Amino acid sequence: MIKRFLLYTVFGLMGAISAPMEAICQQTYAEKLGFDKNDKVLIIHVDDLGMSYSSNTGGLKAISEGLANSGSMMMPCAWIPDLFKRAEKVKDLDLGLHLTLTSEWNTYRWGPVIGTGGGPSLVDKEGKLYKTVDEVVENASLSEVEKELRAQIELSRTMGIVPTHLDSHMGTLFANPDYMALYVRLGIEYRIPVMVPAGHNTLVSAGISPEFKEQVRLIGEQLWDAGLPVIDDLLNESYDWRLPDGVEPTHENLMEYKTNKYMEAFSRVQPGITYVITHCSDPSDIFGEITDSGDTRKGDMLAMLDPRLKAYIEKEKFVLVTWRELMERRKKVK
């Protein structure tokens, strides 16, 4: 997904340019925000809050009792009111918007915040958001995408949560240059940080040319010059970490497996701000009727609660931050 994002960004949003290919990001965005040069700064982030009861329960448990310190909400989903009521009980909760233009499951689905009539190009024959990113790109008009994204931002604010950041469900906004430009523009207009890895991109750029990195770097500069914080790297692997065949998905096995995978992944993190995506859920008896990803999501939650992972982060001296803190730091930098 991230490579596709880079591809569209290079040839769509920024256009073809001939920039000098000196070393990229001599100074990390973490340094620009006042962190030490060698600091490895993590935002440990929970996607898909509001999607389901299980997502709310597991995601907030990972944040309030575990290592996760940020999350993003899917405003079109049915369990958003439950999330907002629970969020009132968690002090200083760092919540952004998982801007949503897809509804990917077969039996549990959602439509746009603006309604079917408000965005006919956004929905399929069931009146729900399209299941795939490709369908959105093929059918959704830019004007109706903008209308829906603004509605999601405004609904969050109306319900009482000012989003601390924006990101994109299933990477849909990275799959079209016009959508990507809109994504960046909305962040700048609303003064909300936007999730775009625009620093050294060590973890996400295997096989990506220096030219690609240069183009993404320019997007980061645009956001930074607009007064918003920018991240250096992205770790988005955990959804695909599945137990080996034949291993029973017990509580203990899931925790041990996922914790080991996170420690291995964190060992590859470089200095700078790295955004770590998790999908923490505490699956109910009916969660399997929505998706078969219950085990990997439960494993994410259990890893966030595992004392071994906490001890590892402390031993390796990682610095945990929220989007709210990054924005406060950015306000102080000229």
Image (tube, rainbow, N blue to C red):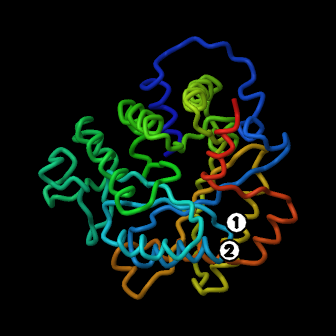
- Would you identify the image quadrant in which residue 205 lies? top right
The image shows residue 218 at horizontal and vertical percentages of: 58, 25
* Type of amino acid at the residue the image marks with label 1: Lys
Q: Is residue 185 left or right of residue 112?
A: right
| Residue 295 in view in this figure | no
Number of other residues with Cα within 10 Å of mark 2, as a class: few under 14, some 14 to 19, many 20 or more: some
Q: Which residue is mark 1?
A: 261
Give x and y (percent) for residue 221.
60, 27
- Residue at image coords 62%, 39%: 230
| Mark 2 residue element | helix
| Residue drawn 43% across the image and 35% down it | 189
Q: Which mark is residue 24?
A: none
At label 1, counting other C-alpha atoms closer than 10 Å, the crowd grade (few under 14, some 14-19, many 20 or more) is some
Q: Position of residue 25 (x, y in %)?
A: 72, 29
Q: Is residue 313 left or right of residue 74?
A: right
Report the disc number at residue 257: 2
Extreme residue toward the right, this view: 315
Q: Measured from the top left, where is residue 276 in percent x and y? A: 63, 56
In the figure, is residue 41 to the left or right of 227?
right
Mark 1 touches mark 2? (CB < 8 Å) = yes
Up-down relation of residue 176 to residue 289 (above or below): above
Mark 1 to mark 2 CA distance (whole Å)? 6 Å
Q: Nearer the viewer, residue 209 or 333?
A: 333
* 43 displayed left or right of 106: right
Amino acid type of the residue that numbered disc 2 sits on in the rendered structure: Tyr
Where on the picture, by quarter, is residue 31?
top right
Q: Is residue 6 visible?
A: yes
Given residues 208 and 141, the one toward you in this image is 141
